[in-house]
Image (spheres, helix red, strand yellow):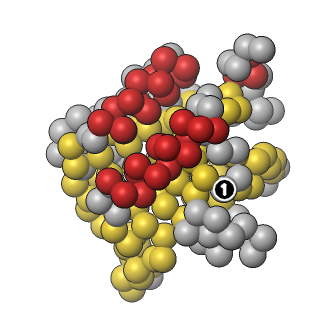
Amino acid sequence: MDLFNKHQTNLLPKDGVVQYFGKVISTENANQFMEALIKNIEWKNDEVVIYGKRIITKRKMAWYGDKAFEYKYSNIIRTALPWTSELLELKATVETISNENYNSCLLNLYHDGNEGMGWHSDDEKDLKKDGAIASLSLGADRKFGFKHKQDKQSLYLTLEHGSLLLMKEQVQSHWLHSLPKTSKVLKPRINLTFRTIV
């Protein structure tokens, strides 16, 4: 079975490319990475500023990179930490499969389905315009959605434990994406988004 045949299909009907590779890491390895990341990553509760009010989220995040990149989103500036050995190993895997290079990784830890992410685009000016963003999922399977900014056309897929999703070209300019909350998911999920800071 060729694990990476799936990636030839673009899931979007227009305005960008989204490719789902399915599981790219065995369940056993994915379990080991999940355990190591929960233990070794410097997790912090994420902060967002909405209408001038600072909100601390239950979801935890971490930011790593080739150097101490500053990355601003939701009006908060974060500084990248040096790569861990696990992150470098995962980065190498993701780069090989996606045929892209990345210099940083934003990690999110969702403790269960009550934590999610609303509709947004990863279009901050610090990011390479129309650059590839590779999203690696570990832990609980979660529903993930895309919605077109103009005509509101939407589509959903399930991101599995050990799977890889790639967003590239004009996706961030034309589409929003989200991780809907659900009371049905009781286990944690870690999402690693490998990206390029300019």
Q: Residue at x 54, y 36 (%)?
A: 29
Residue that badge 1 annotates: 140
Kind of residue sitting beneath label 1 = Ala
Q: Where is residue 11 drawn, in percent x and y?
A: 77, 32
Q: Is residue 52 visible?
A: no
Element under label 1? Answer: loop
Q: Residue at x 38, y 30 (%)?
A: 89
Q: Quadrant of the C terminus?
A: top left
Q: Where is residue 40 drawn, in percent x and y?
A: 32, 53
Q: Quadrant of the N terminus?
A: top right
Above-or-below relation of 74 to 50: above
Q: Is residue 58 visible?
A: yes
Above-or-below relation of 16 to 120: above
> 31 left or right of 154?
left
Q: Residue at x 71, y 52 (%)?
A: 141
Q: Quadrant of residue 26?
A: top right
- In-front residue for pair 91/54: 91
> 76 left or right of 139?
left
Mark 1 burial class by Cα count in 10 Å: few <14, some 14-19, many 20+ = many
Q: Quadrant of residue 17?
A: top right
Q: Quadrant of residue 165?
A: top right
Q: Residue at x 74, y 26 (%)?
A: 10
- In-front residue for pair 18/171: 18
- In-front residue for pair 192/36: 36
> 54 left or right of 152?
left
Q: Where is residue 62 drawn, in percent x and y?
A: 35, 57
